[in-house]
Image (cartoon, rainbow, N blue to C red):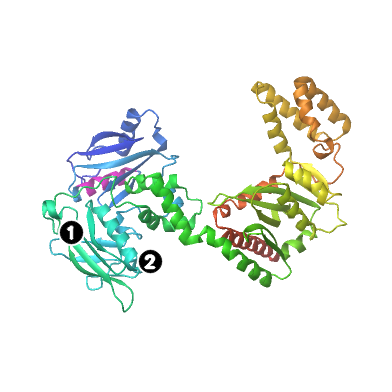
Amino acid sequence: MSKGSTSIPIFLLCNYNDCTFAIKIDRNVTYDQLLDKLCLKWDSLQFDNICLSYSLLGHPSCTLDNNEELELLLALVVHFDSKCTDVVVRGKNSTIDYGNLNKRLDYGEKESMLELEVCDIALSHDNNKSVNLSNRASTSSNKNSRLEVEEKKFEGVIVEFRNALSKFSIECGFEFIFVKNDTVRVTAQCLFRETKCCMWNIHGRVKNANGFFYIRKLNNVHTSGAEVCTMNHSRMSSDLVADLIVKGVRDNALTRPVHVVQDFKWGYGLRVSYHQAWLGVEKTKGDIFGDYLMSFNQLRWYVDVAKSCNPRGYIEFECDDTKRFKILFVIFHDSISGFNYCRHLLFLDGTFFKGRLRGNLLAATRKDGNQGFFLVCFGIVGSENQDNWHWFLEHLSTIVLAERNITFVLDCNLGLVEVLPKVFPTAFRAYCLYHLKMNLRHHLCGIFHGLKEKMITLFGKCAYAPTEETFHQCLVELKIECGLRVEKFLDDIPYDHWSNAYFQGQRFGEIRSNVAESFNSWVRKECHLPITKLIDSVRIKLMRKIAKKRELVNK
C-alpha cells in the first residue's frame, strides 16, 4: 500500500450469506491478504471466485477488486471521517449480483436513492432551509440535474410529488403525516410535531394555469432527533414500488415479484413484502402494456385494422352468445405464400398464457431453409381441447393446398390426436419421440431408475430402427425386459405414427417437435402480455424476423 494512505486502522464489516465478520486493516494489508482472511473465515469461498463491493455514504455499491481500489477505500474512509465500512462478499457466480440487478430491473445507478433517476426530490438538511428539487422530465437527460428553489415544480402533477416525498422520507429516515391531501393541494408535517415539537412541514398545490404541482412552503429543519434508516418504513407501498420499477418492467415483461423483493433488499436495503411487490408489478404492467380486461375490448378494433392493413392475410375472430371472446385465428400473407414453397411438414403445439387471464396459444410452425423455425399461423383459445383444435385446424385447412400430402409432427395430446384425422384425413401423423419417452417414463413409475432408463433407451432404438426387421428385434428385447406394462403402453400408439420403419409419409428426419418448442420459447415473454398487445408483439417479432432474412439474402 502506498504511504499516501492512512496508517490508522479501520474495520471492514464483511457480510456473506447474512453473516457479518469484522476485519481490521491498515495500509500494510494487501488485497490478497484480505481474501485469505475471508477464505479462512468461510470455507465455502474460493480465493479466485470472490467478488467484493463496499458502501459509503451515497454510494452503496463500490467495487473492490485489487490493491489500488483497496488504497482508494482507505482514502475514502478518511475523507468521510468513518471508522468502518460495510463490505458485501459473494461468489462471482452468485445469483444475487448488482450487475444482474441492472439487467433484470434497471432502477438506474445503485447510488443513494436521492441520486436515482427515479427519485425525484432532494431536500437539503441545512439550517438555511435551502431546497433543491428535481422532476422526472428534468432528470431524463441528466441524472444530476436539479431545479432551483425558484422553480419547485413537478410536471407529473400531484402523484409524482407524493411518490417523491415518500422516497425522500425513506432515504432520510423520518416519518410524516398528511394534514391536507386532495387532488389539488398537499400539506405534510412531521409525525412528532405534537410530542417532540418538530416543525418540519411542506405545502404545495396544483397551479391552474399549467396543471403543474408547485411547492409553496417548506420548513426543512428536523428537531425530533436523529434520523435512522431502517429496512422497514411505513411509506413503502405498492404505488412506490411500481414507480421505482417502471423502467425495469418495461424492459423485461417477465419481472417477477420475488425478484423485486430481492432487488430492493440488496440494492436499496429495504424490506418489501411479496404482496407489495406483486401489486407493484401488476400496476406497472397495467400502465405500460394496458389493462387485461380492456385489451379484450380493443381486440375487435385491432382485428378490423389488421384486416385492412393486411388484406391478403386471414384473420378470424369469434365471440360466444354473450359477446365474450371465444377464439381467434391469425395468419399473415407472407406466411401463406412462404408455406407453399416449403417442405410438406408442419409442427403443431400449444402453450399456456402466464398473465392474469388464462388461455392457450395454438401454433403451426415449419422449418425454413436454414433449419430455423418459421411461424405459419397461430390461434388464441380459452383451453386446449377437441373443439378448439378442430376449429383451429379447419381454418388452417383453408390455406393448405388440398393436393399436398402434409406430415404433421405433434405430441400425444388427446384432443389433437382425435381431431386431426377428421380435418386432414390424408395427412400423415408423426408423434414426437421426446413426448413419447416422457409418457413412457411416467407409465413406468415405480420401477427401479436404472431399469427405467434402459427401457426408454430401447424404446428410442425401436423408433430409430430403419427396417421392420431391426424394429421387431428391438421391440422383442424391450418387451422381454419390462413385459406387460410396456405392451399396454405400445397398444395405444400405432407403429406407423412413431417408428421410422413403419412411417408412410415424409418427415425429413424430424422425429421430435423441437421446432414447436422453439416457437414456445420465442414467445415466452409475450405470453405475459394482454391479448391485444400479445398479438401485436408476435406480429412485430415476425416482421423483424422476415426483414432480417431479407437482409441476409440481399447481401
Dot 2 amino acid type? Ser
- The residue range painted magenta reads 66-77
Q: Quadrant of residue 53?
A: top left
Dot 1 amino acid type? His
* Residue 500 x, y percent position in the rendering: 83, 38
Crowd around label 2: few <14 · some 14–19 · many ≥20 (10 Å)? few
Gap in Å between the C-alphas at discs 2 and 1? 25 Å
Label 2 belongs to which residue? 140
Our reading of the magenta stretch's main secondary structure is helix
Q: Quadrant of residue 21?
A: top left
Label 1 belongs to which residue? 125
**Which one is in front, 197 or 538?**
197
Q: Is residue 138 above or below residue 177?
A: below
Q: Residue at x 49, y 54 (%)?
A: 252
- In the displayed structure, does residue 361 sit left or right of residue 81? right
* Residue 512 x, y percent position in the rendering: 73, 42
Q: Residue at x 64, y 70 (%)?
A: 305
Q: Residue at x 75, y 21 (%)?
A: 482
Residue 225 seen anywhere in this rendered image of the structure:
yes
Q: Residue at x 60, y 62 (%)?
A: 536
Q: Is residue 59 above or below residue 304?
A: above
* Residue 152 x, y percent position in the rendering: 25, 70
